[in-house]
Image (cartoon, rainbow, N blue to C red):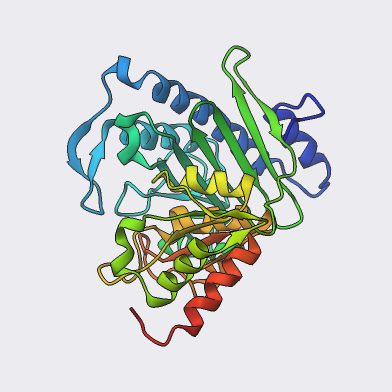
Amino acid sequence: MATTRFMTLPRHIIEGEKLHPEATGELSGILLQLGLAAKLISLEVNKAGLANILGFTGDENVHGEKVKKLDMFAHEMLIKAMDHGGHFCVMASEEEEDIIHLPPHQKIGKYVLLFDPLDGSSNIDANISIGTIFSIYKRVSEGDGPGTLEDCLQQGYKQEVAGYILYGSSTIFVYTAGHGHGVYGFTLDPAFGEFLLSHDDIKIPKQGRIYSLNEGNYFSWPKGLKDYIKYLQANYFEGKPYQARYVGSMVADVHRTLLYGGIFIYPGDRRNAKGKLRLSYECNPMSFIVEAAGGRATDGKERILDKKPEALHERTPIYIGSEKDVLLVEKFLSEAREAY
């Protein structure tokens, strides 16, 4: 998707703001700060081996997973970049068990920030693409004091802005303000030091020939999913066989799906009925982006963006991607006579 105009991320944000006379400029300020944080994290990711920050800290996060050093750098960098602008009332990170309050001396704002500082961190040492995922809501708690857990447990369709930064062969910043506002991708020019528009108004294909999931878990899958994968393996799309592609970083797999079409799946199974991906930190923002690009996201029965989180680190199965592909897997799941 080659751009036909020279457009930096800050310019794109400001020009978008001008289209809405009622805008206060706060969301623009938030996105600009996220862009700065993305540059700093990208710099550390690119020199991680040299900076001796690969590997584990020796600690575990709230999920019982060993924390990578680079995870904590990204986590702390996002907090430092976002906690002083006066835009937020509360934040939450996949790396923290509880909500994150703003410093007491800082102004309390009307927005809420949820983020996964470094998605796919198990791939760090192998130099495989990883990313940051973020989600912005308006507060729903009453008063002008610090935000509450209630502010963080909102349905995904209420997001104001969602996006991700992919750190791979290049660093790409993708964001959307929701349906009707478009999805835009910006690639970081390391020499220029700025994000430049590289993917203008992204539209996901209605159907694709790539399916993405961990087939090593096949025997634990629901019966309908097994039938769906067998169907893909025995059939063709536009005269060519379907292709299996799986990176293991949700942000990388969904980014490819967004550009080329197809489906990314992380199901619930016998061992993990709700799957492993977090509703608020990963599935809601990625679903918001994919739907804004014309795609679809479901847990197999219910639209992801309609699910009401009951806990800060709640998990959910997810089937996300091209509309026709997601509708087809939903059909297989609903018609399966056996659970497994």
Taking 286 as reference, is 178 left or right?
right
Q: Quadrant of the N terminus?
A: top right
Residue 301 visible in this rendered orientation of the protein: no
Name the residue nearer the viewer: 237 or 266.
Answer: 237
* Residue at the extreme top: 191
Residue at the image position 59 percent from the left and 60 percent from the top: 236
Residue 103 visible in this rendered orientation of the protein: yes
Instruction: Give the x, y percent position of residue 96.
Output: 31, 48
Tell me which corner region of the image, top left, top right, bottom left or bottom right, holds residue 118. Answer: top left
Q: Is residue 266 above or below residue 231?
A: above
Taking 175 as reference, is 246 left or right?
left
Instruction: Give the x, y percent position of residue 227.
Output: 44, 73
Tell me which corner region of the image, top left, top right, bottom left or bottom right, holds residue 12. Answer: top right
Q: Is residue 175 above or below residue 45?
A: below
Instruction: Give the x, y percent position of residue 128.
Output: 39, 33
Name the residue nearer the viewer: 272 or 81.
Answer: 272
Name the residue nearer the viewer: 320 or 17.
Answer: 320
Residue at the image position 54 percent from the left and 60 percent from the top: 320
Taking 150 as reference, is 274 left or right?
left
